[in-house]
Image (tube, rainbow, N blue to C red):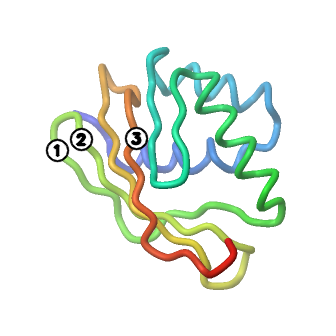
Amino acid sequence: MTDVNTIARGYIDLWNERTPSRRREILSESWTTDAKYVDPLMNGDGLDGVDALIAGVQQRFPDFRFKLIGEPNGYGDHIRFSWGLGPDGVDSPIKGTDFAVLKEGRIRSITGFLDQIPPGA
């Protein structure tokens, strides 16, 4: 049985990891090599594509961090969880919900939805 909390927390940790070599290590351990990520603003294929997306978000929002909102849930190889992106200690100005499809306990794809985006973000 997949532990949805572990997967979701690991995903958030990945997006918060600022050291490129450590981020690549996390990607290699928790994502499949043919992984895909897509949301309304960006998409990436494979570990290199996902890593580039994360680096780009970190560059655009250098003082922001991701955090889980609520409790992840799922069934089988599917997980849903919500997240916030913003400065520590305040309500996140950017929020979304992601849907993960797993393969053998690793993330194979993420489809992201942006629930709240402030103007100009």
- Label 2: state its secondary structure: strand
User: Dot 1, crowdedness within 10 Å: few (<14), some or many (≥20)?
Assistant: few
**Circles 1 and 2: CB atoms closer than 8 Å:** yes
User: What residue is shown with label 3?
Assistant: 110
User: What residue is shown with label 1?
Assistant: 75
Tell me if 35 is positioned left or right of 119 in this view.
left
* 3D distance between C-alphas at marks 3 and 2: 10 Å
Quarter the C terminus occupies: bottom right
Q: Residue sitting at 33 percent across and 49 percent down?
A: 99
* 3D distance between C-alphas at marks 1 and 2: 5 Å
- Amino acid bearing label 3: Ile
- Amino acid bearing label 2: His
Residue 119, horizontal then vertical, whole percent? 63, 81
Quarter the N terminus occupies: top left
User: What residue is shown with label 2?
Assistant: 78
Dot placed on the residue nearer the N-terminal end, 3 or 2: 2
Please tell me in which quadrant of the rendered image residue 76 appears.
top left
- Label 3: state its secondary structure: strand
